[in-house]
Image: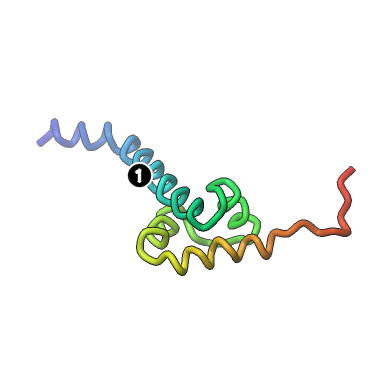
Amino acid sequence: MDHGLQYAYRDRKPKSETFRGLWQVRINAAARAAGTTYSRFMEGLKAAQCPLNRKMLADIAAQDTAAFAQLVRRPRMRCRPNPQKRLS
């Protein structure tokens, strides 16, 4: 029992990292199918202040492709650069 608890303690962080990588792969695959990349999609969601985390996004990508496609379109529309704002 104690040995099992040691393994559970030791592997807790790698388990989290493994799942985060899995979620990123799922989101990237769905984003590319919808015509964008993972980084552009996540950048758009951040700019749109979307409260969804990677776990929820991966679940939506796997279960409901139509809803995920709407999420891909929504940040693109809200994150267009302001034409009056000039970069120096």
Tell me if 88 is positioned left or right of 16 in this view. Answer: right
Measured from the top left, where is residue 22 in percent x and y? 37, 44
Query: Nearest the camera: 10 or 57?
Result: 57
Amino acid at dot 1: Phe
Q: Which residue is mark 1?
A: 19
Measured from the top left, where is residue 40 in percent x and y? 60, 49
Residue 52 vertical position relative to residue 38 in the rendered view, above or below: below
Residue visible at 53% across and 64% down?
Answer: 71
Residue 69 vertical position relative to residue 39 in the rendered view, above or below: below
Q: How many marks?
A: 1
The residue at the far left in this view is 1
Instruction: Rate crowding at label 1 as few (under 14), some (14 to 19) or many (20 or more) other CA atoms within 10 Å.
Output: few
Measured from the top left, where is residue 29 in percent x and y? 44, 49
The local secondary structure at tag 1 comes to: helix
**Quadrant in the rendering for residue 60:** bottom left
The C terminus sits in image quarter: top right
Measured from the top left, where is residue 6 in percent x and y? 20, 32
Residue 31 vertical position relative to residue 13 in the rendered view, above or below: below
The N terminus sits in image quarter: top left
Tell me if 43 is positioned left or right of 4 in this view. Answer: right
